[in-house]
Image (cartoon, rainbow, N blue to C red):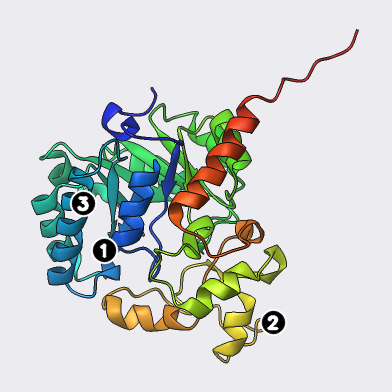
Amino acid sequence: MGLQANLSRGLQLPAISAPMFLVSGPEMVIAACRAGVIGSFPSPNARTPEILHQWMAQIVAELAASENAACWAANLMVHPSNDRLPADLECVLQHKPPLVITALGSPARVVDAVHSYGGLVFADVNSVGFARKAAATGVDGLVLVASGAGGHTGLTAGFAFVEEVRQFWDGPIALGGAISSGRAIRAAETLGAELAYLGTAFIACEESIADPAYKDMVVGANVEDILPSKGITGVTANWLRKSLIAAGYDPANMPEDKKPNFENTQDNSKAWKNVWSAGQGVGAVTAIEPVAQIVARLKAEYDFACKLPRFDMKE
């Protein structure tokens, strides 16, 4: 099916800078779009609906003045316990992001509303079963969160995830999970995804709203520093081991019986304030850099990967 034309506009790379809790803000979104990837942020990062209005208005105004910028996306948390969803959806309807990415629940609650102004909906899913359910709601694309992803992660390997979803879905796919290089972006395309979904690669960017100590920890981390656990939010996520220890947790004995509750997004943010997440691609992050510099490096790696010759079997 391919990628919709309004999402392809301005892209220098087939990639989304994934929405990250307490990391992605308007400056990061704008920088990503100007650099040629789709920029996004989760609505709870704006502490109130009023601030969310301000953020969206800023993004719309600055991108309107930016020639050849890629489009932007808003990320809505559609979990039934999220009491802020109606207000956040009103902001979406007013500012009309070209793409809305739903997470932590059924996208059915927002599909019709976003389609009413011509927007597209991609559903963030972390299993084949959830992908099948989301596809039945009328979404325009699927974000497959595979094993190795930062934040709330999946357990299915990207190779298997794309293969199985392609058996029932011919629409756009964005694949996430330990994708932190241009070579990996090209690999995602080869698997059958239209877009790669990169989060960890951008945590330490200069435009990120992440705590400076968080950025430094990401720069110094490698794959062995990542630990999956339900113990912080009640949903399996990948955490930086050192941040767990600093917050008083024992990585060898994490509480795994916590129930998810997103009723109060600001209370939820307390769980993430000092316990920090990253994906298994963290080892590729070696410096704090501007988004434009990160994207330029990714593009050079991607272009090189695209030129690699196919295997030539010798007679």
Q: Amino acid at mark 2?
A: Ala
Label at residue 252: 2
Left or right of 131? Residue 204 is right
Left or right of 280? Residue 99 is left
Label at residue 43: 1
Residue 292: horizontal and vertical position, in percent?
A: 44, 50
- Foreground residue, 151 or 233? 151
Q: Amino acid at mark 1?
A: Ser
Secondary structure at badge 1 equals helix
179 is higher (above) or lower (below) than 170? below
> Label 1 vs label 3: CA separation?
18 Å
Secondary structure at badge 2 equals loop
If the image is split into quadrants, where does the N terminus sit? top left
Closer mark to the observer between disc 2 and disc 3? 3
Label at residue 62: 3
Q: Amino acid at mark 3?
A: Glu
Query: Residue 88 is drawn in which quadrant?
Result: bottom left
- What is the total number of numbered labels drawn onto the structure image? 3
